[in-house]
Image (spheres, helix red, strand yellow):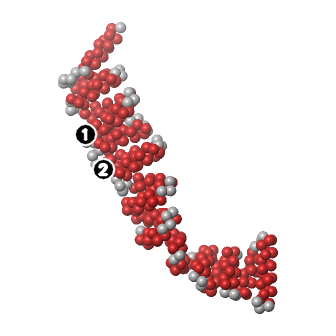
Amino acid sequence: MVAQEQELIRIRETLSLAELDGPISPVDIERVHCELSDYECWLPYVRFLERRIKIHKDDILGNYVRLIRIHIRNLGNLIRAQELCYEVVARLNLTYRQLNTDVFFHVLEPFDYATEAPLLTASVQALQSVNDQVLALERVCLIYEKKVPNDDMLATYYEKLLSTQKTNVKALRYFKMLYSQSYEWEKVVETLTSLVASVPRQNEVYRYGQELAGVYLYHLNRPEKAVEIVKTTCKGSPLDTSTLLYDAYHAQGHWSGCLELLAGLLSQAEKQGERAILHYKIAGLLSKRKEFAQALTHIQEALNADPKFIDALESQITLSIELKNWKKVEQGLSSMMELVSDTVLKAQLEQALGRLREGMAYGS
């Protein structure tokens, strides 16, 4: 009983020490810290720490850390903890690194991302350098993207990150994805253009440049712009831009450009299947230019590479009719009959072949 009374007296003395406005010895300060914490006298301890921060200049950082930790871990007052984080950063001119090592390390439980993010957002504006603000906002975005997923908060802070640093690659990548998902292609173009100008490595310039050309071609129907980007931004790229460039030329009706591109690919193609397709495409373009004889030559090359290429056989028949080369038409129909398995189609081909031979026999 006596021990309990003595303990009670000591606690009252400690509480009285905590309420003093005047000087207090280091020993008594340590006593207040230990005993008010041990006995969980949080409100008197908060008043003591706030008074020390306001009036005295010793151990300001330590007192802020203690105060923030109490509000987070013991009082559950996150809003007040946010206010104090802003105060300590602004008052002591802390860097982002110091905020992490000297404050967060001591006040946050491991993996407590749900608390870390709001403390960071409150501290951002107090950070003096733009670089520190960017680091803090990037960390917030990472938390809301991967640790505590929240799409609304993620969009909000990526927007804030981009307004803080217009060339921030992480934010630009995010908005490229967001605008693509909502089919806002003009905004995708704007974002990709910024990425091309902002990414540090040349291979990324090539990749985003090619993506930009693709958006202009396939979503905005601006093939001339796609060609311009491929020939400037993507010049020297190790990535294959041939399909994109071919489609852009084709959309413009620029047949000579298509033919030049296909000829270059043909000179490099080694597999017979690839060569057959390229010859077939060249023949199609030559047909558009009414150059039927040359087209037929390429169709024959396609069939030499792949004798079972049905589409090429059909083109051989069509071109031979244009050129009135009935012997070639006959060869094409005969080859087609050998390849098709559908009985109805086979019968139709046989009938057509019979009429052709009859016509050839009478010279008509």
Left or right position of 296 against 221 = right
Q: Which mark is residue 130?
A: 2
Which mark is first along the chain, 2 or 1? 1
Between 173 and 217, the one nearer to me in the picture = 217
In the rendered image, is residue 323 in sight? yes
The x and y percentages for residue 255 are: 53, 78
Rendered position, 279 above or below 88:
below
Residue found 69% across the figure and 78% down from its top: 313
Question: Could you give the CA–CA distance between mark 1 and mark 2, rounded to whole angstroms?
Answer: 17 Å
**Residue type highlighted by circle 2:** Val
**Residue type highlighted by circle 1:** Leu
Between 76 and 158, the one nearer to me in the picture = 158
Residue found 80% across the figure and 82% down from its top: 354
Under tag 1, what secondary structure? Answer: helix
Residue at image mark 1: 92
Left or right position of 143 against 9 = right
